[in-house]
Image (tube, rainbow, N blue to C red):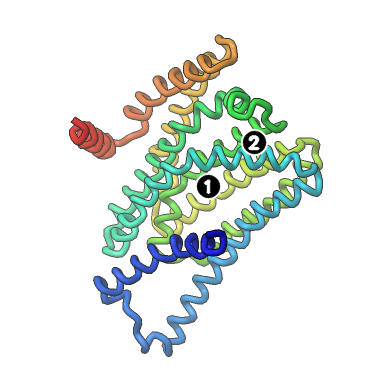
Amino acid sequence: LAKTAPLLMCAMSVLPQLIICARALAAYPECRFRLAYVRDWSRIGQLFAYAGSRFVVLLSLMLSTNGVGILVNKCLGPLRNAAMSVGGTVTGHCLSLASAFSGAFSPAITNAAGAGDFARMRNLAYATCRLSTVAVGIFALPVILEADEILRLWLRTPPDWAGALVVCALVCAVMDKLSEGCWLSVFAIGKVALFNAAESLVWFLMLPVAYAFIRGGFDVVGVGIANIVLNVCAVLVKVYFGRRVAGLSIRHWIRRVFAPIAVAFTCAAGGGVLSVLSAAPGVFRIVQTAAVAEVILLPLVWFLVLQDSERKMVTAKLARLIGGRT
């Protein structure tokens, strides 16, 4: 069994993709192999240019994650990496639902762009930014407010600075979703070369910026601060290229996405901080803080952040869910 386990795990990863490919080949003629394309050097050049630009982005992301681990080991020792690992684990759980939202909107944005319905594409892009951010924030905000206490109850003796790194990682996760619809629109249009170059440049800066913060006396928290700084830059890059390539209005994004979300989360965070200061540490305070934050956040999201069409969609989904259970 020990010898076959790697093969079985490989098959579990590859088999679903092969099934999808077989289904696409059978159902969609445009997915089928055409020998004439092998000799079409202009098409091959475009594919290599696209693949090359994405490779550079993925390389920069790999260096910004794995490279930071090596940097922390060299500068601060392996014990500090334990705190970073905890932050990554907590963030991964909070991002799972938001990934489902972006996965649901991505085909719709691509289809709208392919059909030439750019007005619908832009509306979907703004909706993706709002809904993905809210989906992450609903789960992330209580954890941000009670990170140290949650880690204490979970791990008993969490690594030093683990709570601060969890907060930094979750703040970055929320910020990243603010521009989710922008980069999906850029990829739907297909003009990604300059966007990929700008994004990769941001993440190539991760190592020197993190090193500067660590040497500046911020310890391992410097990695989290560097991550926040570069995530702000990445959001600005995505919003800018959303405007340049897909015609998304930066002013509309600020007014209809960033500003209402910032107001809603700031008010909810303020209520949560008052809850933290008013009760003794423990499970009850965590529950109280989460309840206070969500009671403030959800109505503000409903009336301030979501648009009429999004409220109708959420209402329909909830009605269907409740009706299916009764």
The answer to which image quadrant residue 52 occupies is bottom right
Q: Secondary structure at mark 2?
A: helix
Q: Relative to 87, is 124 on the left or the right? A: left
Identify which residue, 140 or 162, lies in the foreground: 162
Q: Is residue 296 above or below residue 139?
A: above
Q: Would you place residue 244 above or below residue 95 in this image?
A: below
Do we see residue 195 in this rendering? no
Q: Nearer the viewer, residue 86 or 205?
A: 86
Residue 40 in picture, x, y percent from top left? 42, 87
Q: Secondary structure at mark 1?
A: helix
Identity of the residue drawn at 50% across and 39% down: 174
Q: Which mark is residue 216?
A: none
Depth check, front residue: 2 or 29: 2
Q: Which residue was labeled with disc 2?
A: 165
Image position, residue 279 (x, y; %) = 56, 10
Left or right side of 9 for 277: right
Question: Residue 226 at x, y = what percent?
Answer: 67, 43
* First in residue order: circle 1 vs circle 2: 2
Residue type at mark 2: give it: Leu
Residue located 58% across and 59% down the image: 198
Left or right, 8 with reference to 77: left
- Residue at 79 percent across and 43 percent down: it is 77
Labels 1 & 2 near each other (Cβ < 8 A):
no
Crowding at dot 1, Cα within 10 Å, few <14 / some 14-19 / many 20+, comes out as some
Q: Label 1, on which residue?
A: 235
Is 278 left or right of 314, judged from the image as shown? Answer: right
